[in-house]
Amino acid sequence: KKDNHMPAFRIQKFDESWLTRDQLPKNVPTVIIYFSPDCAHCKHEAREIVKNIDKLKNVNFVWISYKEMELIKEFFYVLDLYKYPNMYAGRDPKYMVPAFYRVKFTPFVAVYDKKGLFVKAFDGGAEMPQLLPLLK
């Protein structure tokens, strides 16, 4: 967390292609969520984001996990995240993201402003009253 810029992540998407930080839409806030597909708190986080999607349309959400791709894909589809163009998901096979943030609990949520600069991190998830004001 010494560098306040978004990490240069590289995650494998469902179609086997790769997504990097530089491919995300520019000039919008970004939320990186490191999660586990079998984590109840992670599912809660996803449901809350979907419930508030009207307020979050102009925010990139990057869901990253180390788990098997099929489990990540199931999470993404069962929780309806796939319906929104600002939702991205994939696998971090090199374990770069949790090492960068020193993740202890999932979901781990890192918020970046529209310039890609670090705003705040949440171990164990972020409730909407905490998250929404940071994404204006």
Image (tube, helix red, strand yellow):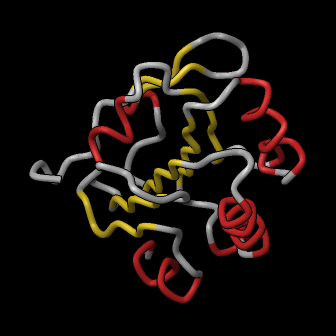
Quarter in which the C terminus is drawn: bottom left
Whether 89 is drawn above or below 107: the answer is: above
In this rendering, position of residue 75 left or right of residue 88:
right
Whether 57 is drawn above or below 9: the answer is: below
Whether 29 is drawn above or below 131: the answer is: above
Give the number of marks. Answer: 0
Which residue lies at the image location 69% right of the left edge and 25% below the top edge? 68
In this rendering, position of residue 92 left or right of residue 87:
left
Quadrant of residue 55 within the rendered picture: bottom right
Q: Residue furthest left?
A: 2
Q: Residue furthest top?
A: 16
Which residue lies at the image location 39% right of the left edge and 62% below the top edge? 111
In this rendering, position of residue 103 left or right of residue 56:
left
Quadrant of residue 28 within the rendered picture: bottom left
Which residue lies at the image location 61% right of the left edge and 30% below the top edge? 90
Residue 45 at x, y = what percent?
66, 67
Quadrant of residue 23 within the rendered picture: top left
Residue 18 at x, y = what percent?
53, 16
Residue 130 at x, y = what percent?
48, 84
